[in-house]
Amino acid sequence: MDNSSWTRREMLKAAAAIGVAALARNAIGETAQEGALRKPSPTIGIQMGLPPVATGDLDKLFDDLRRRGGVNALFPFIYTYAHVTAGMKAEGFHGGNFAMPHMQYYKDTSLKFEDMRAPDFGDVDVMARIIPVAKKHGMKTFAWILEDHDHVPSASWEPLYEVDFHGRRALAHPAGPCYNNPLYLGFVLGLVEDFTRSYDIDGVMWSSERQGGFFNALGAYAHGSSADPGKATCFCEFCTKKAKALGIDVDRARQGFIALEKYVRDGREKKRPRDGYFVTFFRLLLNYPELLAWENLWEQSREELQMRIFKLVKSIKPGLPVGWHIWHNVSFSPFHRAEMDYGRIAKFSDYIKPVLYNNAAGERIRAFADGVSQNVYGDLSPAKTLELLYHQLNYSESPYEKVMETGLSPDYVMRETRRAVDDVGPGIDVWPGIDIDVPVPKGAGQCTAEGVKQATLAAFKGGATGLILSRNYSEMNPEHLTGAGAALDELGLR
């Protein structure tokens, strides 16, 4: 039986049950008109670093979150090796699983307890600490699994990481663990099963802020202009074996990446090709179609893992929601947008969380334009590149010289929410990530409560069924949370 179809049927059954309950309420005195005026409560989540929930007064914290922002769902960074997402200082930080690994679920990986468990709060099991208090406050708790890749956590992790086309282990962003490496698959699926079986969670969210080696070589992501084009991945034994089975010429793919590396390096040195940047780029694709085949192999491998996560959770707890954090790059890169097909992802999703950080997006999309105007868009200036991107992405936003200060508008939030809602279709929730004090460089616009309010209103105007206040409570000015609460009040949603 297809798990995604099963989930949709369950949703329809649930909707029917709600209708029966509504009839019952009418029978005991609630009028049909009163029932029609009652609006469903949307999911209002918040992403959280660890210190507030590992050591703080949870009753006080959860009361404050509900009062200020209408929060009814918690997304703690329960597994992370990044000190920023953990909400902790880099000095002395270790990271890992801030819940307790139950080793019976990790038989298919080489990692040991000490390779997974975060020792930063001693013996505190943060997930076990959060859940009962959250339930008392009527809040849900999701296992928020962030796939870290900015550095290799320890030597034990190295064999799980990707290999570049020069044969070197790629141990840092934009590379990461390999989706075709059985040791990494064993770890991820073990972690998901552990959270699902060991804790009374209300859902699972998994995050991968990555793309394949082809787009990484171009530096086609915000702040990617310094990415090493010689570290495109993955050419490990598992990926090359899979590629050969699919009929992809591995040697031709490697030769294509060598040519692409030279193209990117020449562009950064302002060595304009005789026929221009775009023509030369397109000629590369014609000569080496294996480049796109390799990118597609990478993306298919990630989606296969997502499908396995979805099916695993449904086999244990069929009604438990499973969804995905969608990297902000989908808002800047036409290339990444093309491969992140929401309609295809919907087949193994209960919800998606597209990152729509409109305040931080101004600086990020400008940085993206700076990067790709060194190669694919190199026939244009960065300002003209940004203008072209707006046309390609269907935006109407500030010009290059102003966008860092203004950020992107609430209209961007509305448009991207609507695009997601239309693409996933009925039955799949869309919970946009709303920007609250996501750090920006000097000169960029600053977050305000009013800005949060307008972004929240725009998300619901676009058809969102909820939202996730982001990126991290540990970074937020609590007063700015009131912007979300004010929007919910204006809409009559709390």
Image (cartoon, rainbow, N blue to C red):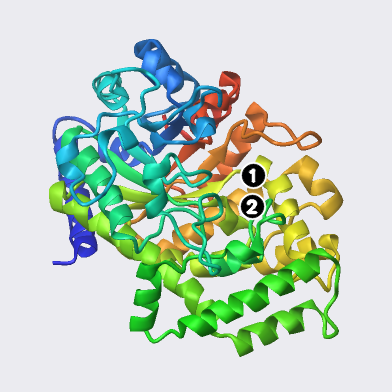
As drawn, 170 above or below 88: below
Residue bearing mark 1: 358
Check whether the beta carbons of the residues at disc 1 and disc 2 lie within 8 A of each other: yes
Looking at the rendered structure, the secondary structure element under dot 1 is helix
Judged left or right of residue 31, residue 462 is: right
Judged left or right of residue 442, residue 87 is: left
* Residue 464 in picture, x, y percent from top left: 46, 48
How many marks overall? 2
For marks 1 and 2, the one nearer the N-term is 1
On the rendered image, what quadrant is the N terminus found in?
bottom left
* Residue 232 in picture, x, y percent from top left: 56, 65
As drawn, 86 above or below 315: above
Residue 151 versus residue 272: which sits nearer the camera? Answer: 151
For label 2, the crowd category at 10 Å Cα-Cα, with few meaning under 14, some 14 to 19 and many 20 or more, is: many
Spatial distance from mark 1 to mark 2, Cα to Cα? Answer: 7 Å
- Would residue 475 be visible to someone looking at this image? yes
Looking at the rendered structure, the secondary structure element under dot 2 is helix
* Residue 375 in picture, x, y percent from top left: 75, 70
Give the residue type at disc 1.
Asn
On the rendered image, what quadrant is the C terminus found in?
top left
Residue bearing mark 2: 412
* Residue 420 in picture, x, y percent from top left: 48, 58
Residue 354 versus residue 420: which sits nearer the camera? Answer: 354
Residue 293 versus residue 303: which sits nearer the camera? Answer: 293
Picture quadrant where residue 263 is located: bottom right
Picture quadrant where residue 9 is located: bottom left
Residue 21 versus residue 356: which sits nearer the camera? Answer: 356
Judged left or right of residue 177, residue 129 is: left
Give the residue type at disc 2.
Tyr
- Would residue 23 be visible to someone looking at this image? no
* Residue at x-position 28% and y-position 23%: 125
